[in-house]
Image (cartoon, rainbow, N blue to C red):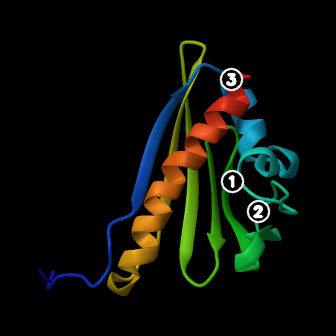
Amino acid sequence: MSNSSSNSLPDIRHTFTFQAPIHKVWNAVATSEGMSAWFMPNDFKAELGHEFYLDAGPYGKNLCKVTELDPPAKLSFSWAKNWTITFELKELDNQTEFTLIHAGWDAADQVPYNNMNHGWAEIGQRLGKYVQA
C-alpha cells in the first residue's frame, strides 16, 4: 500500500466543540499556565518567534518555536524535529470550536503517528474538561 505521490502521512486533525467562550479557550491554549493544566509543563509565551520547551517527562524536553500567532483565532508552533502543531479557534454561540492539527509526519512514523492520534483525542478531552469547569 504505497502512495507514489507522497512519502508522508496526513496531518492529524481533531475538532472539538467546547461550552466555553473563545477567550477562555484561548487563555487555556496560549498561556504557559493554561497549557500546563491540560497539556504539559512548558515555558511558553504568546510571542511570535518565542522559543520554549515542552516537558514531555520521560521523553525529555522538546524545543518549540511560535511560528504563527493570531489571537484568539490561531496559534502554531514547531515541535521537535519537523512537527508543526496548530490550534484553530472559532467562536460559535457561546461555544468555541477548537481544531488541533499535528503536521509534519513521515511515512516511517506510522507507530508514533497512531499513538499521537489517540493521544491528541484524549488531550483534547482534557482541554474540554479544563475550559468547561
Image x and y of residue 46, in percent: 81, 54
Image x and y of residue 20, in percent: 65, 21
Classed neighbour count for the residue bearing mark 1: other residues with Cα under 10 Å, few (<14), some (14–19), many (≥20):
some
| Residue at the image position 67 percent from the left and 21 percent from the top | 21
Distance from the alpha carbon under mark 2 to that under mark 1: 6 Å
Instruction: Check residue 48 in the rendering and tell me which mark sits there, or answer none.
Output: 2
**CB contact under 8 Å: marks 2 and 1:** yes
Element under label 3? helix
Tell me if 121 is positioned left or right of 76 in this view.
left
Instruction: Check residue 77 in the rendering and tell me which mark sits there, or answer none.
Output: none
Q: Quadrant of residue 29?
A: top right
Element under label 1? strand
Residue at mark 1:
69
Q: Is residue 83 above or below residue 127?
A: below
Quarter in which the C terminus is drawn: top right
Image x and y of residue 123, in percent: 60, 48
